[in-house]
Every structure is written in C-alpha cells, then in structure tokens.
Image (tube, coloured by chain):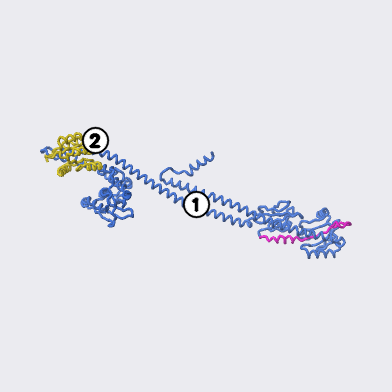
Amino acid sequence: MNDIHVLLVDDEEELAKTIAERLEIRGIYCQTASDGDKALDLIKSQPPDVVVLDLLMPGIGGLEILKQIKSLERNIPIILLTGYGSNELRIEGMNLGAIDYVLKPCNLDDLIIKIQKAIKSE
Amino acid sequence: MKTSKFQEFITKYIFRIPEEGTSPERYKALRRNIIILMILVTVIPLSLMATINYYQYQKNLRDEIISPMNVVTNKTRRSFELFLEERLSTVRFIASAYSFHELSDPVILNRILSVLKREFDGFVDLGLISSKGKLLCYAGPYSFLDKDYSQQSWYHKVLINGRYISDVFLGYREFPHIAIAVQNLTDPDCCWILRATIDTKKFDDLIATLELDAECDAFLINQEGILQTNSKFYGKALEICQLKIPNGGQGTFVTESQDKNGRDIFIAYSYLVEPEYTLVIVKPSSLILKTWFTFRTEIFFIYLASVLIIVLLVYKITDAQVNHIKKADEKRELAFRELEHSQKLSSIGRLAAGVAHEINNPLAIINQKAGLMKDLIKNSKDFNEKSKFFELTEAIIKSTDRCSTVTHRLLGFARRMEIEYTDLSVNDVLQEVISFLEKEALHRNIKINFHLDENLPRVSSDRGQLQQVFLNILSNAFAAVTDNGNIIIRTWDEDVEKIGISIEDDGCGMSEKDLENIFEPFFTTKKGYGTGLGLPITYGIIKKMGGSINVKSKLNEGSTFTIYLLKIPKKVLDD
C-alpha cells in the first residue's frame, strides 16, 4: 500500500492529522489540507491518488472545493466525508462527481477499503 | 342605569360562562344558559297567550251569563206587573160598571165574585167599604161584615191615591194574599171603596214558569226586604229576606255576591213600579260557570302539558347541541395539542441537530485519537500494562461509538427527510425487520407470533422509514418482555382507506403516567441506555405519512401499539 497517496481535506486539523498518522501507520501516505486553497495547491504540486474531502467546512465549503478539483481535470477520485444529517449535501456531492462517501466519525478500516476501491475503479 | 345594572346581574350570575377550556363547569353553564334562554323565549309568549285567552274568555262568558239573566228577570217582572195591572183593571172596571146599590146587594156581589173566580185566577173575596171605612157588603168565604178598616193605613192610601195594591199579608184569612182596593169617584153622591183579595199562589205559579234549577232561587221582596213569596234558601213568605238586595231604583241589574252559606252567586233583580216589589233571581256561580271551570281546567292542563313538552324538548335539544359543541371543542383541543406537540418535536429536533453536529467533530477526534493510541500500542513492544492500555483505548472507542449512535439518531430525528413513496407490502417489511432481531429472539427464547393478513393490500410508503418505525416498536417490545416472552404481530385491512398493524407484547407494560409521555422526546423508561428518541421519531414518521399511532398498556400485563397507514397517502394522491 506504500504507493498510495491520499490528500485529506478537513478544517478540523487535529482530526485530519490523527487520521493521516493512522493511515501512515497502515502504509498509506496521507497529506492534509485545512482549506480549499491549500488543497488545490497540493493537488497541483503533488497530485494524490485519492482526495478525501470534508463537505462541511467554513469558507468556500466542500462542494465548491469539489467543483474546483473537478475543474482541474486531473481525474482524481474524490471520497466525501459527511456528517450523518447532511444527506442533501452528500447527494449533491455525488452528483458533482464524488466516487463514494464515508460518514463521520469514520471507521478507519472502512475508509481504507473505500480508498482502495476508488483507486481500483480508476 | 337600572337597565345596565340588570344586564350586569344577568351576565354576572346567570349567563356567566367560564372562559376557554373544556372543563365540565363550562358546559354545565352553557347548558344551563341555553335552557334558561330557550325556555324564557318559548314559555313567555305561551304564558301571555294563555293569560289573554283566560281573561278574554272569562269576560265573554260573563257577558253571556249576565245578559240572559237580565232578560229573564225583566220578562218575569213584566209578567208580575201585567198580572197585577190586569187584576187592578178588573177591580176598577167592576167599581166603574156597577153602582153602589148594585154592589151593596150580596147576591150581585157574589155573582160578580163567582164570575171573577171563573175568568181570572186568584180572586178570593170582594168587599164594598163605605167612605167611613166600614165593610158594607162582602162576597167570599169569610164573614167580615161590619168590619171597620178606617184605622188601617191602606184605607188612607186608597183615599189619597184612589187605588192601592198591598204587600202580601196574612190578615184574618191566615194565608198569604194581597189586597187591591179602588175608590169609586164616579158617583158624586157618595164615595166608596171596592176591595178584592187575591191569593198569592199565582205568584208562585209565575215563578215556576221560570223552570229554574234546583240550586237556583227566585222570589219577590218588598221595600223593607220582607219576602213576598217563599224562597228556597232565604226564608219563607213574610219573613225578612236573608239576602241583602239594594233598595229602590229602576231597571234590572245583575251583581255577583256571596250568600250566608258562603256560596258564590249571581243575583239579578228588577224593580216593579206598583206595588214597589223587587223581583230577585239567584243563581249559584258554580252552576253558571260550569263551562268556565271546564275551560279553565282545560286551559291549565294544556298550558302545563305545553310547558312540560317545551322543557323536555329544550332539554333534549340543548343536551344534543352542547354535546356537539363539546365534541367539536375536544377535537379542536386535540388538534391544537398535536400541533403543539409536533412544533415541540421540530424545535427540539433543530436544537438537537445543532448540538449533535457540534459534538460530532470532537467525537470524531476522540475516536481517531483513541484509534491512533490503539495502533501505537499494537505496534509497540510489550510494556508494563500494555494489555490494560489496549483495553482502555478499546473502551474509549466503544464509548465514542455509542455517542455517535446518539448523535446520529438526534440528527435523524431532526432531519427533514422527504418520504420516498414506493409500492410495498407491509407484511414483507415486518418480516425483514424481524430478521434483524431473529438472533436476539432465539437467544432469549422470545416467541414471535405472526397473524398477518395474507390478502393485505399493498400500500404506497417509504420502506426505510417503515423499517425504522417497526424496528423502534419491536426493540421496545424486546426490551419489555422477559426471556420466554411473547410478541404478537398482526396486520389487517381496516377499511377502504387504511390498513392496520399491531404489535403486542406481554412484557412489563407502562403506567398511565408513562403512557402519556412516551411520544415526548428524551422521555425514556430504559434508565441508562435509552435515548428517548425512538418513539418520537416513530410518531413523527407515521404522522408525516398521514397515518396514526396509538398505544394501550397496562403495568405488568403488556403493551399494544396499533398503527394505521393510509393505503395511498394524500401526498401521493395530490401528485
């Protein structure tokens, strides 16, 4: 799994850091970004295999970031990270081209399975 | 001023209705007020009409009674007057037709008397009296010859008036009679008086022609109130009449009075001109007013019956009306409460969603941190209490999982889910839900009995939400029953619009107080591990689908949840 590169976009830096650390323990390289700009910069400089994107974020918000990533036309699969109650957001995200979603608080093993699935489908 | 005080009194004490609410006092007051008003409105005109009728009829009847009495009395008086005038004329005729000499002859006088007796009723005797008052010649059954009348008052009256009709008297003859005397003035040489005595039996005959009832009376009295004929009730002839009759006057009168026996009577009396007698006819009121009394009794009973019918009808109608109002009020109250409840649910839901969302992120961090700790412990070499730390992190992760279940439920409760209607079989959904719980049922030996209607129509509903509804209720049933307990699931076709589903358990049941609160958010009887959201969510879903849910429960006997679902929800129909 060492060759998998994930970008985790979440405004909760503490959460993002922890998940990243846990993924790395499992041999997945994970970068984190706390907002859209940073995320786009990272995608441009080091395109990841998968982007895990929190939809509920202050500022421009997850959906807008999703659109911008899609506009880069890098063909990077995007997994959404959503709260339980935001069905509409999730559906809209899926319509905009996200490949899958994980409910928060997420089970790490589920996330890894979905990351692997996403790469395979690609 | 007076009117406003009266109005104030009416509003304050009679028409006071307790303010809003559905208290029994309110309906009691309402019922009372309507009854009073309706009775007043109906009984007052009825009473007025009855009273007017009563007096009008009484007046008419009185007129009808008085005028015939008046007429009869008048006629009878005329008969008496005629009788007496006739007798007087006869005596005057004899006094004029015969000379003193002829009348002085007892043979002629007797012959005249016998003719009189034959042609006219009542003549008893005839006497010729000299100007000195001495009886010169007499024809009749007694021997009064040479009797001197000069000292008697009637003699002087004849000398003054030329004629005289006496009151009734007994005299020497010892039976009631009257005397008619006329003075002869045609003979210039001497002045003499012809006097005839007439038996008053003829008076009785005249009265008898009236054909009066046994309770009626008729008689003659003179100016002094002395009876001239026998009376049935007020004395014999020549006694003082026991009935007071106004003295003197002209014409005929009818009055109401009471006799000495306390009888109410009508008295009709008429004054004769000569002699100055008064003819009296007495009739008891009871006899005359018999029709009146009958009418009065009839009117009273008709009135009473009408009032009774009115009261009864008013009572029945008011009762029905008030019950109608009461039901409408209760319905409104119920609708209001349901609205209040759903508003409460929605505001609590929004609050809960906010809180849950805010908690979700820190919870995720705790979860991930604990996960990381677990990873690190797992990957590190053995150290003191390694397994203990491993267990502790496991416990933290489990607790955060439990917390997230609660927050997910809170969010689910608040979520404005659009119901996705699909055509489904409720029996299938129930079977699916039971399959989730099969393991627990097997483990605890809980018997689940199905009484599902095989021909249950398919309905248009949301599968996921229905699953949640049945799962919530069945989870509660599983929590309520002991091991080896029983759960019965029924479905049936209720009517054209609805199907029914019931889930019955023989578990611990609920108290009445708990029963009132089970649909309230955060109310739970499962101390420690219930969220208090299962049934409010269930309630919300069923309501959103246009169905209804109710619970019957008895402590220590079990509970039954009954759900009615619309076969085709209104929203689907509208679309």
Which residue is at a point 58% across and 54% down the rendered structure image? B296
Picture mark count: 2
A118 vs B164, nearest the viewer? A118
Q: Do the residues at pointers 2 and 1 share their chain?
A: no
State which chain disc 2 sits on.
A
Front-most of B49 and B218? B49
* Coordinates of residue B235 in the picture (x, y in percent): 70, 57
Is residue B525 shown above or below B241? Answer: above
Give the magenta part as a residue range. B184-213
| Left/right of residue B163 with respect to residue B380 in the rendered view | right
Query: Which residue is labeled 1 in the image?
Result: B311
In which quadrant will I find the N terminus of chain B? top right
Q: Is residue B149 left or right of residue B543?
A: right
Which lettered chain is shown in blue? B
- Relative placement, left or right, of B95 versus B323 is right
Asked if the stretch drawn in magenta spans residue B310, the answer is no
Indicate the secondary structure of the residue bearing disc 2: loop
The disc numbered 1 marks a residue on which chain?
Answer: B
Give the colour of chain A.
Answer: yellow
Q: Which residue position is annotated with label 2?
A: A60
Q: Is residue B406 visible?
A: no
Query: Please, which residue is most extreme toward the right here?
Result: B189
Q: Residue at x 27, y 40 (%)?
A: B353
Mark 1 is on which residue type? Val
Q: Residue at x 44, y 50 (%)?
A: B321
